[in-house]
Image: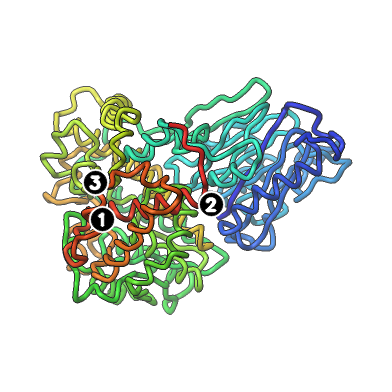
Amino acid sequence: MCGITGWISYREDPQAPEDTDDLQGPHAQTSVIERMTATLARRGPDASGTWCGPYAALGHRRLAVLDPEGGTQPMTAPAASPGPERVPAPVSVPAPHRPPHAVLTYSGEIYNHHTLRAELRSRGHRFATRSDTEVVLRAYLEWGDGLTEHLEGMYAFAVWDARRERLLLVRDRLGVKPLFFAEIPGGLVFGSEPKALFAHPACRPRVDARGMREAYGLLFGTGETLWSGVREVQPGGVAVFDRSGLTERVYWRLEARPHPDRGVAATVDTVRSHVERAARAQLEADVPLCTLLSGGLDSTVLTALLADELRAREGPAARLRSYAVDYSDQVARFTGDVLRTGHDTLYAAEAAAFIGTDHRLVVLDPRELLDPAHRAAVVAARDSPIGVGDMDTSLYLLFGEMARHSTVALSGEAADEVFGGYPWFRSPAARDAETFPWLLVTGDEAAMPLHPALADTLRIGEFRADTYRSALSAVPHLDGETPAQHRRRELQHLSLTRWLRQLLHRKDRLSMARGLEVRVPYCDHRLVEYAFNAPVALQDFDGREKSLLRAAGARLAPHSVLHRPKNHYPATHHPAYNRGLQDMAHDALAAGQGRVRDLVDEGVVKPLLDTPPEHLQWGHRLRLERVVDLSLWLEEYRPELAF
């Protein structure tokens, strides 16, 4: 996994003399792309590389996972030379007498790279490395933009086609890996994170009313972002930039299709086959790997499959390492809420013993979550003031501990979206409401009370209503669907195309900030397509959430784990944390020359500062978390606020 960045400009002579102010000059190009690349150092601690040529500069930070000795990036394919050699092997930097055909900067993992390598070899391609990076480059040379139809995995990459003077940006189907871009005068900048774009002198951090609505509406769309002029490549999408401008299209989206199997048993067998295949494909790495094992159904089934596959490959003594997180106060102070029904630790330990993993419990002191350096690092990793407070900080600390021993982790993320695990799939109020269901269930809707003076400018209620209607219009349906099937398809589509997006962003940003790659097998697009088209009667055949996954993993988890209710990521309940958070929020309101006060409704926030810490409800606490993060974000980015 890695960080990528680059910029394209057609405005002036790219070989302008060094002493001009032209950013296209070779020395200026090098300086700018190196600054952009340096912002992504945490995503790629193992190596750094840049490439500069006419009209283009590309950068790469590498976290070496496959073929550590090979796969140097940016990777170039020299133009074909005369003679029988149809496709020359790549080199890391093109020699002056061999200008490149194409240059690639790539982040991600291609899980079918062995199959693609064999096919490309049969078509005359020669390979110089074992890396999946080279497979992507060769696939572009063979199929052009059509390479997207052949790739399976999580990825975001850019190809500069030097012959055609054209940039191609590509993102994986579910949007596991991020990719941002912004048009600038005469060109375009791109990167794995917005901070890379802001290192270019023509792209500055600016937020307008539209961006505030995107952030604080909590609707988690893609395309538009918090930042003015900065967009995401759509999941399952490509963007092409050339002299005629920018064009975008999608190469994959969820479609409504008839369910191919008959009955529960056949459907469960197919689900099991898809999950097993995805787990096997994602176990490959040339570095240590581990799993996140919370003791929930999703992570336990996945960890069991991975542990079985590891023993099949390496022998019966092979043990997969697994991790769980807890707080030092959790046993004594756990308090349930709409998202948390029990204490994870005992379930995780039981699951680990059942599966036979080398299990590690990372216990955090709640006061550690108040460390200003940790909080600032989390906000900087997100590039956003919108997070979930202590749950983000604890995940950041957990990933840091995991990264001490492993480079790759596998997570059960997305199973709730794929198999209908959230409360809103069964809540009558959420099913019947004409709004995004998580706004009713999570208690997050009012978690950032904005200043009343902004109400007429932002019109967040109107924005939510308009966006909801637009989102429903994008949901595919089959003729003759029952009302229950129709609504389930809507809820599942909203969950997969919106709610999941912010969870994937969170996991990518916080893990990559610690130099840890997290893979998500439940985001396998064939599994997602299959589950999306399973009739609601099959999805809920046992009257509970995630019926199909529970049945598919029946022999892979202990009974207690199989039948425990859905549990959200844990949060601390320690009064010392609440008191410390109240102090931080108080300081935040006074910081930044009043900029926080200009954005926050103090009438809502100030009473929470005086609430006894032991009585501060989680939803109210989240309001204070957002105030603290807003202050840190304003300090980190000093954005222009244009609203």
Q: Of helix, strand and loop, which one carries label 3?
A: helix
Residue positioned 34% across, 31% down in the render: 458
Question: Residue 498 at x, y = what percent?
Answer: 34, 39
Q: What residue type is labelled 2?
A: Glu
Q: Earlier in the sequence, mark 3 or mark 2?
A: 2
**Mark 1 surroundings within 10 Å by alpha-carbon count, few (fewer than 14), some (14 through 19), many (20 or more):** many
Could you say where residue 336 lies in the image, as x and y percent from the top left? 16, 62
- Look at mark 2 in the image and give the residue it sits on: 109
Give the image quarter of residue 295.
bottom left
Which of pointers 1 and 2 indicates the residue nearer the eye?
2
Residue that carries the numbered disc 1 in the rendered image: 552
Quarter of the figure with the C terminus: top left
Indicate whether 618 appears above or below 330. Answer: above
The residue sitting at the top extreme is: 244
> Is disc 2 placed on a helix, strand or loop?
strand
Specify few, some or many for label 3: CA neighbours under 10 Å numbering under 14, 14-19, or 20 or more.
Answer: few
Where 21 falls versus 316 (above or below)? above
Instruction: Give 437 or 299, whichever is nearer the viewer.
Output: 437
10 Å neighbourhood of mark 2: few (<14), some, or many (≥20)?
A: many
Left/right of residue 230 with respect to residue 121 in the rendered view? left
Label at residue 603: 3
Name the residue nearer the viewer: 460 or 507.
460
